Image (spheres, rainbow, N blue to C red):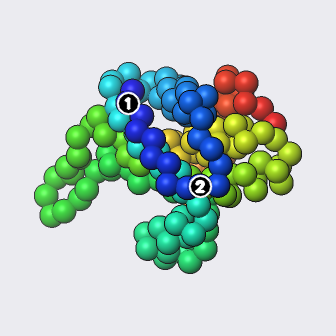
Amino acid sequence: MELLVSNEQGIHLVTTELELLFKKVLEAVLQAEGETGEVEVSLVLVDDKKIQELNRDYRGIDRPTDVLSFPLREAVEDEGPKVSVDEWLLGDIVVSMETALRQAEEYGHSLERELGFLIVHGCLHLLGYDHQREEERQVMREKEEAILTSLGLTR
């Protein structure tokens, strides 16, 4: 798996240890989901202002959020058969470091656990999971907790 990290925030130092954690978390998600091929994921770390802009522009919600995912594997339906982009490109995950820091404090756990959760959540979206309905939300929650527990990133 190739991970491209782009740090576009100045709120928290992104250390080599954090980057290793990001890669470890993504590899755990891919392994848990049986994703065996070589894939590329882009992780962009931003502040609340930037993620609010993205949330407004792409989802029509004008407020900050913690994580956004932009899958590149999604099948596109035109008037013909479904077409997918290159299978090895999973997509982009955008995390607000500002929100992650705030949520880690609110929930009383480490920043590493919060970032791990947000990255697992984002990666599951890249792999096609959603949480619009209660059944979908429950499936995602169970997968998230199982992966985080396997990594020792518990509350």
Residue 119 location (% of width, % of height): 57, 42
Q: Is residue 141 left or right of residue 131?
A: right
Quarter of the image for residue 20 reads top right
Category of crowding for the residue at label 1, using alpha-carbon neighbours closer than 10 angstroms: few (below 14), some (14–19), many (at least 20): some
Residue 74 can be seen, yes or no: yes
Residue 120 location (% of width, % of height): 58, 39
Q: Secondary structure at mark 2?
A: loop
Q: Nearer the viewer, residue 90 or 15?
A: 15
Query: What residue would you read off at disc 1?
Result: 2
Q: Residue at x 62, y 44 (%)?
A: 13
Q: Secondary structure at mark 1?
A: strand
Q: Amino acid at mark 1?
A: Glu
Q: Nearer the viewer, residue 85 or 9?
A: 9
Residue 24 location (% of width, % of height): 55, 26
CA gap, disc 1 and disc 2: 24 Å
Q: Earlier in the sequence, mark 1 or mark 2?
A: 1
Quarter containing the C terminus: top right
Residue 150 location (% of width, % of height): 67, 22
Asked whether disc 1 touches disc 2, contact meaning CB atoms under 8 Å apart, the reply is no
Query: What residue would you read off at disc 2?
Result: 10
Q: Amino acid at mark 2?
A: Gly
Q: Nearer the viewer, residue 125 or 46?
A: 46
Quarter containing the N terminus: top left
